[in-house]
Amino acid sequence: MAIPEILSGKDVLGIAKTGSGKTMAYALPLLQRLEGTVSENRHITALVLVPTRELAAQVSDVFIPYSKALTKPLITMAVYGGTSINTQMMKMNSVDILIATPGRLLELIESNAVHLKDVQALVLDEADKMLTKGFKKELDQILKLLPSKRQNLLFSATLSMMLLR
């Protein structure tokens, strides 16, 4: 149900069980919408924020093979703490879609390794977990750096419907 809405550029809140294909539900339409866009060096066009490095790697594993199938492949990269920031900084050239944990993203921004002014789509994957893990301050900082005109996608397996009432 989310795919047509994402393709049309609408903001989407998706809640579904783990293993239901949430990542695919936003990855495929984002790739289709962004195909043909040209990113300026170190200026990403889509940002996927995740709470953990494990989820960053998992999301990247969904994006990369489908991106390679595009006429002009979009470069996707996952960044997270616990690994060398220098290695990640050197690989930031020509990245179109960045999957990041909030803390590492802010470190890369502070180092001028990545810029957010051209972001067309923001995905918060498991945003409720990011908030419960204490990332609210970092999320607020990141949101202030993003363009106000962008597509917003929030996907979660654990967000309570009670919170939405």
Image (tube, grey):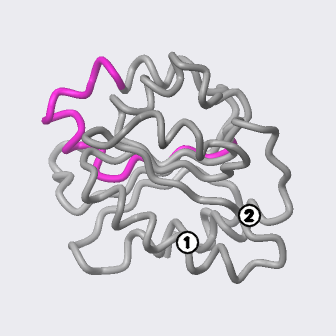
Q: Is residue 131 magenta?
A: yes
Where disc 1 sits, the SS reads: helix
Residue 134 visible? The answer is yes
Residue at horizontal 33 percent and vertical 29 percent from the top: 103
Residue at horizontal 48 percent and vertical 49 percent from the top: 48
- State the image quarter where residue 83 is shown: top left
| Image side of residue 34 versus residue 133, left or right | right
- State the image quarter where residue 85 is shown: top left
Q: Are marks 1 and 2 in contact (CB under 8 Å)?
A: no
| Image side of residue 43 versus residue 138, left or right | right
Residue 130: % across, % down: 24, 39
Work out whether 113 lies above or below 37.
Answer: above
Residue at horizontal 43 percent and vertical 17 percent from the top: 141
Of 151 and 30, which appears nearest the observer? 30
Of 139 and 74, which appears nearest the observer? 74
Decide: few, some or many residues near mark 1? Use Cα within 10 Å; few <14, some 14-19, many ≥20.
Answer: some
Residue 56: % across, % down: 36, 55
Decide: few, some or many residues near mark 2? Use Cα within 10 Å; few <14, some 14-19, many ≥20.
Answer: some
Amino acid at pointer 1: Ile
Work out whether 144 lies above or below 149.
Answer: above
For the C terminus, the quadrant is top left
- Highlighted magenta segment, given as a residue range: 120-138
Of 90 and 16, which appears nearest the observer? 90
| Image side of residue 151 versus residue 20, left or right | right
Work out whether 3 lies above or below 11.
Answer: below
Where disc 2 sits, the SS reads: helix
Mark 1 = which residue?
A: 64
Residue 67: % across, % down: 65, 73
Mark 2 = which residue?
A: 33
